[in-house]
Image (cartoon, rainbow, N blue to C red):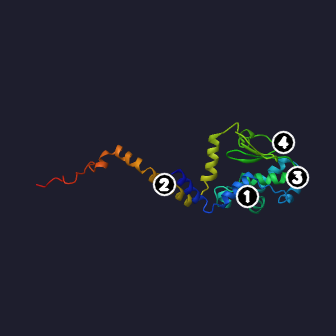
Amino acid sequence: MIVLVAAWVGAVVYPDPRPFFISMERLKNPPVDSQAAAQLAGDLPNDHKSVEDFVASYVPYRTAWTVYRLPWYFPTVAEVLANRAGDCQAQAILTASIFEAKGMPYTLRYSFDHVWVDYPGKEATALEDPATSFVADDGKGWLASLPDKVPLWSILKVRVAYHWTPMPLLQKILLLLGVAVIVGYGERRFFVRLTRALWPGAASGTAAGRWPRGAWPRSR
């Protein structure tokens, strides 16, 4: 049943599954592109915070649902520049590309609810805290480890706001109906037993106000 639910959810939110697998590959190999960001890099000072602030204004935050009509998508730098909007991954990949073009040190970090670019002297925040990072790419390969902090409530809120809230209404309806049908069919025996336990008469056909077959009262 779990496999069916996962398959249905995937079919609803990714009718074409290719963007999902492309994004997974880019997640493992971030498409940092210094050449695509070279022109922007040339106009910016060699200051990490200035570059970070510029990207935040140049690429206003928009979810993948809004920009790509997908629940999650990892764009290239060229796509970010073309759309001039995107989520934390879009902002991070452009920021990293500018740093790369300028030869400035940086580290891409991933937590369970955020992607960001770390750099020497950057102050940690609740959302961008190295202690919550479980993957980092400092140019020497991936370093996977358990994070020191796992803020579950924050992760849940961010995921709902990112994946569920902006989802188109039709897809929400299809997703919920499909899951309900799959779960209902898979657990039909449980629901039958539950019905019998709650309403014993429903199983025997002698619920209140009903007479067993062949036992109808005769009129005088």
Q: Which residue is under mark 1?
A: 75
Rendered residue at 80%/50% (across/down): 53
Q: In which quarter of the image is residue 14?
A: bottom right
Disc on the earlier residue, 3 or 1: 1
Disc on the earlier residue, 2 or 1: 1
Q: Mark 1 and mark 2 in contact (Cβ < 8 Å)?
A: no
Around disc 1, counting alpha carbons within 10 Å, would you say few (fewer than 14), some (14 to 19), or many (20 or more)? many
Q: Which residue is under mark 3?
A: 102
For the residues labelled 2 and 1, the Cα–Cα distance comes to 33 Å
Label of residue 120 in the image: 4
Q: In which quarter of the image is residue 15?
A: bottom right
Mark 3 or mark 2, whichever is nearer to me: 2
Secondary element at image label 3: helix
Disc on the earlier residue, 4 or 3: 3
For the residues labelled 2 and 4, the Cα–Cα distance comes to 50 Å
Secondary element at image label 2: helix
Label of residue 92 in the image: none
**Amino acid type for the residue under numbered disc 1:** Pro
Which residue is at the front of the view, 119 or 58? 119
Percent across and percent down for residue 37 are 83, 58
